[in-house]
Amino acid sequence: MKFLIGGESFYNPLTILGRNIFNINAYLDNNYEYRYNYFTGGGIYSLYYILMHLDIISEEYCLLPSYINPSIPELFDKLKIHYKYYRINSNLKIDLDFLDKIIDKKCKAFLVIDYFGFHHDNETNQYINNIKIKGISVIQDIVQAFLPKYSLIGDYCFNSFRKFIPVDGSVILSRNKLNIQNKRKNLSYLICRHSARIIRFLEVELNINTSKLYLYLYNLSETKYYNYYNIKFDIYNKTLLQKINIDDIVNKRRSRYNQLLNILYEKALIKEMPADVIPLGFPIITDNRDKLKKTLAKMNIYCSVHWELFSNILQNNHSESVLLSNNILTFPINDSVNDSNFLRYLEIIKSMVK
Ligand SMILES: Cc1ncc(COP(=O)(O)O)c(C=O)c1O
């Protein structure tokens, strides 16, 4: 088996032939108190449907965190919905004093992101609950949190399966009925992304070098992904989701997070993992980020930057978020390697991260 670890989780094409072991509807019923749930083809598509429902008119706006995946403000721009940024500090906490100063009557919605799968602290959650009392709709982005065990505060919440398992899709949890119409398939995306996953599977299993082809297909799939926003959760992905051992996935991620915390405590961005969290990855802060990322890539360890920020944040005096964006690096903790390769990965990291 080839030594290679990256952000994408392990995909064995034979999984689809296995028996059903996961019932998503039962999971949602048992873990969350939302009246409605809806499935779509991905996280950004779920947000699209939530925004369509909220119908934010031209003089109104949505508050977005300054530390954010660029695909979100891009969606707002495409839909011509106004937004303002609130401040996120370099420890990923919301600057509540700043928020107090900018929030006003025109604010229709507030988007909160649970970074790397971690919920905000009690003071922040209390603040967000007060926002709801003012009649502002809260959208909770749990894309980096998978199917979290903690209680959710959003009026609308949405996740993304592909960040944790090789399944393209997302679920919206909602207190209100949504009108989800005109859903279509994004076949070109699905073909490119699944081909990329199969190529990676073969590369690792057969120890061959197909990295260039993998990257080509992966990048192509990402460009196809944003062609349309009204995309449905298709039957292949729906079936695949039922075949995946979710407990194994969660336990492995939590254990790998803790193993990294043991060796990289000083550099860790988040130094404690509560029992109800399913972590996306292990973010560190380092001042030689780009060099480290390149060196590790040469050793088949592919780390991600969450995120290179959208240009209008850089111009808007959100210096703490910019600092974070310049120095952050996320180490994968998924199941893309077996346990013995994970130990080798830990040894390499231990020697490389100073
Ligand atoms: C915080 C956050 N929200 C939303 C999205 C969009 O999710 P998807 O890629 O499933 O469309 C992403 C994507 O990485 C994200 O990181």
Image (spheres, rainbow, N blue to C red):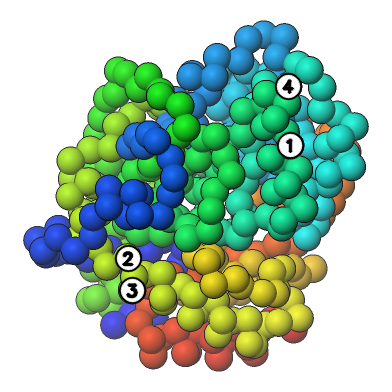
Q: Which of the two discs, 1 and 4, labels the residue nearer the N terminus?
A: 4
Task: Indicate the secondary structure of the residue bearing disc 1.
Answer: helix
Q: Which residue is mark 3?
A: 248
Q: Is residue 43 left or right of residue 275?
A: left
Q: Which mark is residue 107?
A: 4
Q: Which of the two discs, 4 and 2, labels the residue nearer the N terminus?
A: 4
Cβ at disc 3 under 8 Å from ligand 1: no
Cβ at disc 4 under 8 Å from ligand 1: no
Q: Quadrant of the C terminus?
A: bottom right
Report if residue 222 is visible in the image.
no
Q: How much space separates mark 2 and mark 3, taking CA atoms?
A: 5 Å
Query: Which residue is drawn at the image coordinates 76% and 33% (left, top)?
Result: 85
Name which residue type carries label 1. Answer: Asn
Q: Which of the two discs, 1 and 2, labels the residue nearer the N terminus?
A: 1
Residue sitting nearer the eye, 182 or 309: 182
- Residue mark closest to the camera, 1 vs 4: 1
Q: How much space separates mark 1 and mark 2, taking CA atoms?
A: 34 Å
Name which residue type carries label 4. Answer: Cys
Query: Which residue is drawn at the image coordinates 62% and 28% (left, top)?
Result: 137
Q: Which mark is residue 130?
A: 1
Name which residue type carries label 2. Answer: Ile
Task: Indicate the secondary structure of the residue bearing disc 2.
Answer: helix
